Image (cartoon, rainbow, N blue to C red):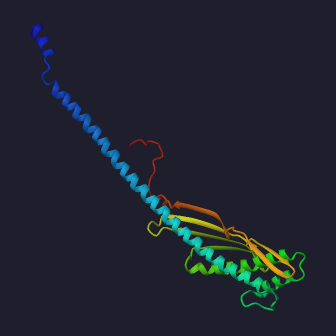
Amino acid sequence: MNKNSIKNNMLNEKGATSVLVILMMIVLVTLGSFAIASANSNIKLSKTSANWNKLYYELDSLGEKYLSDIDACLYRAEINAISYINNEEYEELTHKDLPIELHIAAREMMEEPQNIDLAYYNVLNLVYYYYADTYIKELSEKYPENVISSLPDGAKISAIITDIILISPEEPDYYLNVSLEIRPLDYAFSNEGGNLTYRKSDSLRYSVISWQQAQIHPAATSDIEIWDGNISPKK
């Protein structure tokens, strides 16, 4: 083969177009695969995010319903407590609802107090906490997981804390933990000239200690063997 023949073969561009087409097809197929994989991943993430948002608001709604039920109990307790003051039920020998020790403690608070307005406030919350504890415990049928912690102080209850885990009805692995502290009633009393007047603040009857959503992570299976990083020689 002479030099001209070799030169002609090197300059011959037959088949170059086919090679370029094949390379372009490979590039396009590769990019298309990446695009499809990326789109599929985005779809899965979007569905997961949408499901999380749905569960979040469902659990949040369960929590708000729980707050509403607790507040309804506290409202009943407040009505009974203020009625105890207005009707001067503390002057009776016994009371239809209150334990005798609690009722006697209320009577003693109202007997010649140094500060009559403070005495009304203390008796109000003495009775209020008793009714609040009673009514909240009645919610056990509706909320069996509700944990009520009452701090006794002699005959009275000085603090109440509730704690509950609300589980999603659709996804049992997702839950909301709600903890509340029952606050004393914020009433300002005045007894001038034998006329009792009082004013209530706009504060809530409870404080939210915890409002936390979480997911239960299943424990790892114990029979799964995990490589320790050491290469054992073949036997």
x then y, percent, for residue 56:
49, 61
x then y, percent, for residue 91:
82, 88
Above or below, 29 against 135 in this view is above
Q: How many marks?
A: 0
Q: Hey, which quadrant is residue 224 in on the image?
A: bottom left
If the image is split into quadrants, where does the C terminus sit? top left
If the image is split into quadrants, where does the N terminus sit? top left
Q: Hey, which quadrant is residue 94 in on the image?
A: bottom right
* 188 or 52: nearer the viewer: 188
**Which residue is painted at 56% across and 81% down in the image?**
141
x then y, percent, for residue 79:
69, 81
* 229 or 152: nearer the viewer: 152
Residue 153 in sight: no
Toward the top, the furthest residue is 3
Q: Could you tell whether 53 is left or right of 40 in the image?
A: right
x then y, percent, for residue 205:
68, 71
Residue 220 in sight: yes
**Which residue is painted at 59% across and 62% down in the image?**
211
* 177 or 10: nearer the viewer: 177
Q: Could you tell whether 167 is left or right of 84 in the image?
A: left
**Which residue is painted at 74% across and 86% down in the image?**
98
Q: Could you tell whether 229 is left or right of 23 in the image?
A: right
Above or below, 207 against 152 in this view is above
